[in-house]
């Protein structure tokens, strides 16, 4: 089917109003989905209009969802009308309104909706705390190795209690500490060897001979008949 501006406008309107899916729209205008996407790709103005219509539709749906959620959180009034008709005396073929009863019912706030909002807020706070901890990690200084071991077990158990009763967590922590100890021992051994080599080099060097300082005459100018004690 050949591209037509009128057809494109109708398609945009149906997308924006969320009346039908893309497949249903294609069936309505007797075009294939392939043709629709070819138009969207080959006609930039049509493609942009489709994206804008989708964005507008999503905005409207989000706004409606927020209004509905607000009503569930605050409560709302539900109105129900009951109309009774009777034959028209002047025109028996038609009916006229005889009575109209309007019932109003207050619907209290929904506990489920309130719980949903509170849970969402808690999840948001937890996410913000996690991001903050990643940017600024918590540093805890401990005075002894056993306290550090217990903290590592707590971390290995997902910061939940009972980690010391989990053999797998305890074994993993002990293995990590053992590997750290081996690494530290190797590093200390290398440092000691380097220090010993430096000391051996210093001892192997011959001692420097003392340098005799020249005598300095503190009184280079004396009156006639006087001599310096340093002469």
Image (cartoon, rainbow, N blue to C red):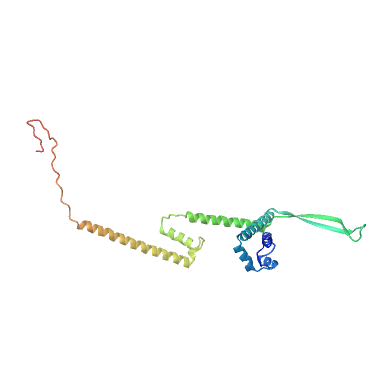
Apparent side of residue 71 relative to residue 182 in the rendered image (left or right): right
Looking at the image, which residue is at 41% across and 59% down?
A: 145
Q: Relative to the observer, which residue lies in front, 139 or 29?
A: 29
Residue 146 sits in which quadrant?
A: bottom left
Residue 79 sits in which quadrant?
A: bottom right
Apparent side of residue 212 relative to residue 58 in the rendered image (left or right): left
In the image, farthest residue toward the left: 225
In the image, farthest residue toward the right: 90
Looking at the image, which residue is at 24% across and 57% down?
A: 199
Apparent side of residue 128 relative to residue 186 in the rendered image (left or right): right
Q: In which quarter of the image is the N terminus?
A: bottom right
Q: Relative to the observer, which residue lies in front, 100 or 23?
A: 23
Number of numbered tags placed on the structure image: 0
Looking at the image, which residue is at 60% across and 63% down?
A: 42
Residue 219 sits in which quadrant?
A: top left
Q: Where is residue 17 in the image (x, y as percent from the top left)?
A: 69, 59
Please tell me whether residue 215 is drawn above or below residue 95 in the rendered image: above
Q: Where is residue 105 in the image (x, y as percent from the top left)?
A: 76, 55
Q: In which quarter of the image is the C terminus?
A: top left
Q: Position of residue 65 (x, y in %)?
A: 66, 57
Q: Relative to the observer, which residue lies in front, 150 or 183?
A: 183
Q: Where is residue 84 in the image (x, y as percent from the top left)?
A: 85, 58
Q: Relative to the observer, which residue lies in front, 129 or 146?
A: 129
């Amino acid at each position: 089917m050949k591209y037509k501006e009128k057809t494109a406008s109708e398609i945009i309107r149906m997308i924006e109003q969320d009346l039908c899916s893309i497949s249903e729209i294609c069936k309505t205008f007797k075009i294939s989905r392939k043709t629709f996407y070819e138009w969207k790709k080959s006609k930039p103005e049509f493609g942009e209009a489709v994206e804008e219509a989708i964005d507008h539709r999503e905005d409207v749906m989000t706004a409606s969802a927020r209004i509905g959620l607000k009503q569930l959180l605050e409560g709302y009034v539900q109105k129900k009308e009951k109309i009774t008709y009777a034959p028209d005396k002047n025109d028996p073929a038609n009916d006229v309104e005889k009575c109209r009863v309007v019932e109003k019912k207050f619907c209290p706030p929904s506990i489920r909706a309130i719980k949903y909002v509170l849970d969402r807020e808690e999840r948001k706070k937890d996410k913000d705390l996690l991001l903050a901890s990643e940017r600024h990690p918590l540093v805890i200084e401990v005075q002894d190795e056993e306290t550090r071991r217990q903290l590592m077990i707590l971390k290995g158990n997902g910061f939940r209690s009972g980690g010391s009763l989990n053999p797998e967590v305890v074994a993993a922590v002990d293995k990590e500490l053992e590997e750290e100890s081996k690494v530290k021992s190797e590093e200390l051994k290398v440092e000691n060897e380097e220090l010993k080599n430096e000391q051996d080099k210093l001892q192997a060097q011959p001692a420097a001979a003392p340098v005799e300082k020249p005598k300095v005459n503190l009184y280079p100018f004396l009156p006639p008949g006087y001599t310096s004690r340093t002469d």
